[in-house]
Image (cartoon, rainbow, N blue to C red):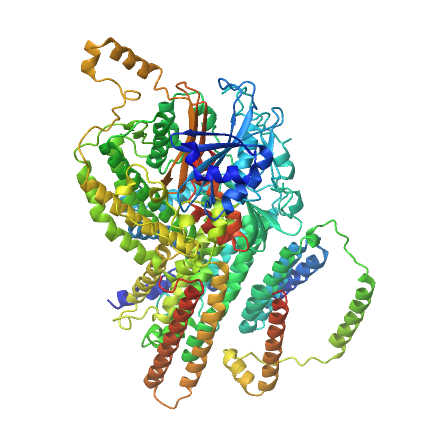
Amino acid sequence: MSQTNPAVEKLRAQFEGAIQAESEFRGETTVTLRPQDLVAVARFLRDDPELRFNHLSNLTAVDWSKYPGHAAKERFSTVYQLLSTRSGQRLTLKVPAPSSDSPIVPSLTGLWPGANWPEREVYDLMGVKFDGHPDLRRILLPFNWPNHPLRKEIPRGGETVPFSMTWEDEEFASFGKQIVEAKAVPQVPPKQADANKHMILNMGPHHPATHGVLRVVVELDGERVVAAYPDLGYLHSGFEKQGESIRYKDFTLYTDRADYVSSMCTNLSYSLAVEKLMGVDIPRRAQVIRVIMAELQRLASHLLWLGTSVLDSAGVSHALLMYCFREREQILDILELVSGARLTTTYIRPGGVWRDVPPSFVERVQDVLDAFPKRIDEYERMVTHNPVWKSRTIGIGKLTQAQALAMSVTGPALRATGLAFDYRKTRPYSGYEAYDFEIPTATDGDLFARYLCRVAEMRQSLRIIEQALKNLPDGPVWTADRKMSLPPRQELDTSMEALIHHFKLNTEGFVPPVGEVYECAESPRGETGFYLVSDGTANPYRLHFRTPSFVNLQATDLMARGGFIADLVLIIGSVDITLGDVDR
Amino acid sequence: MDYIRDFFINFAHSWTTWISGGLPGWAVTVVNFLLGGLILVMMPVIATLALTWMERKVIGRIQNRLGPNRVGPWGIFQAIADAVKMLIKEDIIPDRADRPVFNLAPILIFVGAAMLWAVIPFGRRMIGQDLNIGALYVVAIGSITTVAVLMAGWASNNKFALIGAFRVVAQLLSYEIPMVLSIGVVVLVVGSMRMGTIVESQWVPFCLVLPVAFITYVLAAIAETGRAPFDLLEADSEIVAGYFVEYSGLKFGWFYIAEYGNLMAVSAITTTLFLGGWRGPFAGAAPVLGPLYFIIKTVLVIFVLMWIRGTLPRFRIDQMLAFAWKVLVPAALVNLLWVAAALKLPVPQAVQYAVMLVGNLAILGVTLTLLGQSAKQHAKRHGLAGA
Amino acid sequence: MQHVMFFLFAIITLGAAIMVVTTRNLLRSALWLILVFFGIAGIFVLLNAEFLAVVQILVYVGAIATLIIFAVMLTRQVMDPKQPRFNDQARVVAGFATLLFVVLAVIVTRVAWPVAIGAAPVDAIQQLGMDFVGPYAVPFEVASVLLVVAMIGAIIIAREHE
């Protein structure tokens, strides 16, 4: 199989000896490279006119120290998932870091500026340094955190927390002096901000326009934004570390809590990743239900975005927020109907969906389909043609297609630059290839374009739901594969093996084969992906969670520079972040 | 019956006669002045109590909600509950705030809001002080608000407050000009700055004669009171609350009261200048109806302002200033010239008014066309011609 | 009664004026200056010149003082009370100030001020307006031209940065 991958063939031809190994698992090729060749290989992969792996979709690292059969090799390796937005091909690069004590690999920020934050995250959590990184600091944890928690020797829980809310803290040295002596304000990041020339304004972590506990340190020249430095980690809760110590199926609960306004879509991404690792097939009915739920969730998420985005630009008095909430309520009721929960659904699970939908489901979804087109028209009348809204959004927060790709931006923000890149079309999953829908794009890459894309996506989601609802097949909603599904009740009475199997599945959980996969799905915010490394036990050896909010938020600075504070607020809104999704 | 017909004035006379019985002449004056002053000073407070409830209800209905409905019937005591809450809240003064200035600002802003009421005619002869410079006085008092806001923004030692204060200066100074120009048009037509005379001479409401001046004034007034879509000085999603972000308890309350007092005052002045004040059917025969008409018209204006608040996004600071200087000021200036010319025509007043109306409509049409074209160009520049 | 009010306003004005020059905090100085303007406005009211009083507030408090405060807010170093109060031009300025004071004192004491006899007209504004476009049309227009020139100059200075 591996010999047939043209990308690897080309690489072999181009870079003599650079490829240390290559492997194939579940149809995905992984190439192991020498560290010194990484940048050259990545540049070749990105720029080669035939391959054009132009999207750095994921960047993470693995600590192999406790991995069976890995004792003598390098302890850390960084992992890169590259994707061609044109062909949808994916290639995984793996780079073993030379030293075990202070592992260091070359940085990819020169090729993809968007590798900045993911590399900082790897440094923060894993302690792998990146050579050539412009600003290698901790990103999620406090600057004085004593260890790199994703390393295997660090226990989960019980660690001392170096938070000290005392007046001796560095942060408080300048407390209350902000206006009198602007230079005393902690500069974030210290190298870039010029506090003597500009005003440093701290927006957040408690600020109404940051949509959660995001802190944005804004460098201002009058009302103009010179630079905006997002400061993250206020909601960091160590999902990845937690994921390594619980069973695969138990982590589904955590995926709800990351992107808490589109939990169905995150559930779906995780389930896809686990199912790929297990190699199981999902019955048709479950797939169609998944599509309906994911699209409903997309509608709900976009509605919330629309309401809060207008809120950012108009203040609490604007009527649209409540209108959007009224519609979202209708969808949340359906989510509650099928899963029992409105926000943290855990409905789509590895193996299928939790339960079959109740009989009234079809009718309720039909109500949504009947009501929504008119409602969306109404919003468009309220907002799309509103001169104030247009003047606030047209030409603001521009991002070109090249910039968006360089920053690894995905989702509506990327599509607003004119690239029709959507995983539902590029790498269809859950049977999306069977539906007739379009990927809305706009050419401008500004706030208005993003707004138009999202509104158009809502209409497309309705189209998908309508088709799915019409063709909702009968049948089971859980996989028949015995690796993941419990034996039926009647078998337990007759078969000892079935009983043991039942017991094992319920206590230990399902056990995937040794291997590693990366799988992602198109969430309302962009690419939500999971990188799973299995060591053949029921717990993931490594679980990395690639969230669109985290990666897209990086582009804020780029978009906000030169604009006004008022624009910055709208730009943060247009990225459509969920802080749970950013910090995890 | 005659007593009822002009109840308020007659009642005031009876009252004066009654206290004259036991008091010397100067004491009567002092008592009456104190009473009148008290009523005027209470106006912003009354306005706040009434308007917060109304605003919540109106915005609530616009937003598909019920609004307050727990405290008292239809929630009418909600404002009182809020007032109690405000009274018992802790008064926080930020570390390193400029204390005297910090404490003075809320007082000053309230003074500005209260003083406006001195020249507002509630009905025929029902006016605190019919100053011969009434219209100008209204504008001058507005500048006290500016100073108070600047003081608050500075003294809070908070960057958001400081940005709010900067915005206030830019916004209030810019919008004072179209405001003065549109008031100037009315003064020109009436030939007096007395608020009483302005109302008396409106046999047809000036909003029907001078729509440009009316619209300019209302827009400038929204900006002066800092309400959506011009609420940049306190933009909650950008600079959190702007200049009064550090205030709490009753000091915050003063800002709140000043805000609603100003809203009501501005609506009352709009009514006086453009909607014929207390004039209405039978108001001449029964002046007691005057205040009723006055309040109805004022509430109508307030309702429109709330409606705008519920439906329009906020402007950005540069757009807002550009709107003042590039749209409102030229339109108001042209209007002023046109009206001055029309007044020189040797024809009856009705014909003069008709000429003014025609000119006003023309200015309105030209302004709107130009605005539409520039919006189209803006969209085109960014490649969204069809959007 | 009038005299009491006059002295009250005079004390407010002069006291605030002294505070303007002695306060170390520049912003407070500007605020004291506003009080000075209010005191002067009060004296105008006592002189039956309501129009001037209102214009005093509108222009001096509303525009000039606001701009002064604005300028103060934008200068960071000047705000520090520890800054030296005098710079190297202090002596020259003191000399000119003394000279100005002497000249003003001479004018105030030597000129026979014509004191108006009789009450001021009740509605002086119309007369004022008539005078502006009548006998004083030329000075009025010259003042307008001066303002326009100043405005154009300001715009040009502001444009230079772009």
C67 sits left or right of B126 in the view? right
- On the image, the x and y values in percent for residue C97 come to 78, 67
The part of the image, by quadrant, that contains residue A350 is top left
Q: Image point 37% across, 71% down: which residue? A: B274
Task: Evaluate whether residue B22 shows in this view.
Answer: no
Task: Evaluate whether residue A421 shows in this view.
Answer: yes
A13 is higher (above) or lower (below) than C39: above
B21 sits left or right of A149 in the view? left
- On the image, the x and y values in percent for residue B51 come to 36, 53
Q: Quadrant of the N terminus of chain A?
A: top left
- On the image, the x and y values in percent for residue A93 come to 50, 34
Residue placed furthest toward the bottom: B346
A358 is higher (above) or lower (below) than A303: above
Q: Image point 23% across, 33% down: which residue? A: A284
- On the image, the x and y values in percent for residue B368 come to 38, 71
Q: Quadrant of the C terminus of chain A?
A: top left
A497 is higher (above) or lower (below) than C43: above
| Mark count | 0
Between A317 and A251, the residue placed more toward the observer is: A251
Between B162 and B253, the residue placed more toward the observer is: B162
Between B154 and C31, the residue placed more toward the observer is: B154
A444 sits left or right of C38 in the view? left
A358 is higher (above) or lower (below) than A183: above
Between A60 and A335, the residue placed more toward the observer is: A60
The part of the image, by quadrant, that contains residue B14 is bottom left
Q: Image point 42% across, 25% down: which residue? A: A515
